[in-house]
Amino acid sequence: MPRVALFATCLTDTLFPATARAVVTLLERLGCDVEFPFDQTCCGQMHFNTGYADQAKDLARHFARVFAGYDAVVAPSGSCAGMVRDVHPRLGSPTPDAYELSEFLVDVLEVRDVGAYFPHRVTYHPTCHSLRVLGVGDKPLALLRAVKGLDLVPLPAAEQCCGFGGTFALKNPDTSTAMLTDKMRHVLGTGAEVLTAGDNSCLLHVGGGLSRLRAGVRPVHLAEILASTEEEPWAPATR
């Protein structure tokens, strides 16, 4: 099995460590040797998107040094994996084999049934970078359909952006809020208990809106669903 490095990403490492732990639990269960390089930092996406190309270039070079020598780099974020795969080469940085979690499971490990158990009604939001930069397609849905006990309900207008977009939500708050309102309306219309996605940034944005509405829909990262088993079922993280 491949020697895998976990690229936790800034947001997950800072605010959602349960997601990073879930990735390790899942990959080790599937036979991978998973390591966490402690020198990892930001991939530079925020810097690049706000016009700081030189700083992004330095971070891309650092990323390449930290993750050199691994068979694969796996991230619980289509956004950050997309930055590494799509933008780092344009910044002149050699790129290790970086994957978003679902594409690593389906394309590299060639598994869809990971032995998960999650007895909840779930709807899935496909994040923009996973769709439009990485092209993960229905891989996350294939993984969710194989989860024992999970009731998967389709999300209307699923491919519409949730309005987060990194700094877009800060620079264009009115537009972002309007997009968020549409997304929440569609989520609530499914009757789901859980909203899942492959990026904690989108779950933070949509989940925050749902929380303010006291809607009772919990955002849960895809990795945490896939790591849940009957013997060790998922439980809400406490902070």
Image (cartoon, helix red, strand yellow):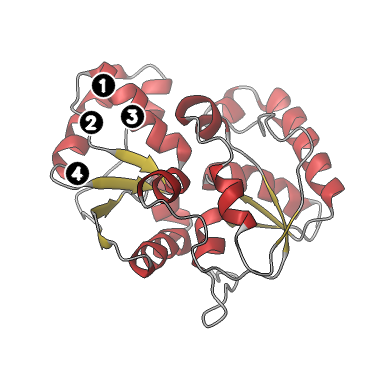
* Residue 207: % across, % down: 67, 50
- Name the residue tied to disc 1: 89
Question: Closer to the camera, 139 or 63?
Answer: 139
Could you tell me if the residues under marks 2 and 1 are in contact, i.e. CB atoms within 8 Å?
yes
Q: Position of residue 11 (x, y in %)?
A: 44, 47
Of label 2 and label 3, which has the lower sequence position? 3
What residue is disc 4 on? 67
**CA separation in Å, label 1 and label 3:** 7 Å
Residue located 81% across and 56% down the image: 215
Amino acid beneath label 3? Arg
Q: CA distance from mark 4 to mark 1?
A: 15 Å
Q: In the rendering, at what x and y percent does residue 24 appear?
A: 36, 63
| Above or below: residue 194 compared with residue 60 | below
Determine which residue is flagged by label 3.
85
Specify which label sits upstream in the sequence, 2 or 4. Answer: 4
Q: Give the mark nearer the N terminus: 4 vs 1.
A: 4
Pick whichever, 88 or 30, lies toward us.
30
Asked whether the viewer can see residue 197, the reply is: no
Q: Give the SS element for disc 2.
A: loop
Marks 3 and 2: in contact by CB < 8 Å? yes
Gap in Å between the C-alphas at discs 2 and 3?
A: 7 Å
Q: Are marks 1 and 3 in contact (CB under 8 Å)?
A: yes
Secondary structure of the residue carrying tag 3 is helix
